[in-house]
Image (tube, grey):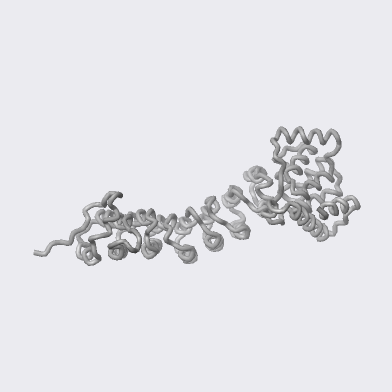
Amino acid sequence: METDPPLPSRAPTSSNAADGVQGLSAAEYLAAEDRLTAAEKAALASHLAAGLGSPAHEGIVEAEAVLRLIAWNAEPPVLEAMAEAAAANPNTPRSIAWALANDHEAAAMVVLEVCAALSDEDLIGIVQAGTSSSKACAIARRPEVSEKVSSCLVDQGGEDAVHALLANVKAAIPSDAFSKVLDRFSDSERIHEGILDRPSVPGFLVQRLSTLVSAKLRTKLAERSVLDVLPGYADERSAAEWDKHLAAMVRDGSLDETRLVRELCSGNLEFFVRALSALSGTSYVEVRGAVLDTPPALASAWEKAALPKGWMPVAAAVVAALIQTDRSAGHTDRDLFCRNIVTCTLANLRAANFTLTDAQRRLFHTHRGR
């Protein structure tokens, strides 16, 4: 009398899971498939997927074949059990990961979110297919998201996927992608907040956000550290030390418009903001927001500080130059950085048809010659 082929009656423990890839052929599985319950198939799928080892491991080919058969016509709970085990196994082959990624959504999301077997090209292909917002969100939450995948999500993913990408601090998002995010979702408050919550935000983006964000987010925009978003340098002082230092400068009259612009040209934006705060009697956070906001906001802070109006366009041009300068430039050659800022500032002033005074020319000549 013919007997049924042997099958594992339960998933083995983790200590002997690797042994489970041996002793079961695809033919044996097919012969017994009809009499297996969904729970038994789920246990078997989880057992085999967890036990997959290196390609040289004995029985690996048969184990993969059985898993593909299970995945071919399995119920969702079976696929989910297989996906969880496959996603946690660093040795899962691409063929299995790819099959699961393109199958039942709940199982696909588990694999797409963590499985290392899938390449950037695989992930991009799934995003471009546009068949599932949930799958795109899972890809956006991966422990590592390359710039290529991020760009694809920004170009073709929905708002939920882009929001998930922004929330993933380990996602590498190229600077130009942020502009596309705002082009696509300019009215989305949660996208604005997602950008502001990133560890690093390009300066040009902060300036653009200042014209878009709601009143609710303006405080968060202002609270961004100046040197988080612009290149440059800052003195290492506490808030109390800054107050004492600047109060002394106010008393001796050395805190004037030329000193403020000179410090800006040197990349010391922190000094500029704190000095403008001290002179205007406006809070540091408010002035910082004004500096990173539109030119009229900076002009208002400048006027409150009772500084000469003729120097305000110059200060604004230097701030614009800092925004336009590659952030990494502030952390290499400082003299070269200062010369680049002056060159960019003068170009900004020429574009605005602004005529420099003799004092302003001397200041820029000094910095350009550093």
In the displayed structure, does residue 300 sit left or right of residue 18? right
Q: In the rendered image, which quarter is residue 57 located in?
A: bottom left
In the displayed structure, does residue 244 sit left or right of residue 68? right
- Relative height, residue 191 to residue 270 (above, below): below
Residue at x 45%, y 64% (from the top left corner): 131
Q: Position of residue 115 (x, y in %)?
A: 42, 57
- Relative height, residue 99 to residue 168 (above, below): below
Q: Position of residue 31 (x, y in %)?
A: 20, 65
**Total of numbered circles in the picture?**
0
Q: Position of residue 49 (x, y in %)?
A: 32, 57
Q: Nearer the viewer, residue 339 or 118?
A: 339
Observer able to see residue 208: no
Observer able to see residue 225: yes
Q: Residue furthest left?
A: 1
Q: Quadrant of the N terminus?
A: bottom left
Residue at x 21%, y 64% (from the top left corner): 28
Residue at x 25%, y 60% (from the top left corner): 22
Q: Residue furthest right?
A: 358
Q: In the rendered image, which quarter is residue 2 located in?
A: bottom left
Q: Nearer the viewer, residue 122 or 55?
A: 55
Q: In the rendered image, which quarter is residue 89 located in?
A: bottom left
- Relative height, residue 290 to residue 185 (above, below): above
Residue at x 79%, y 58% (from the top left corner): 343
Q: Position of residue 279 (x, y in %)?
A: 80, 38
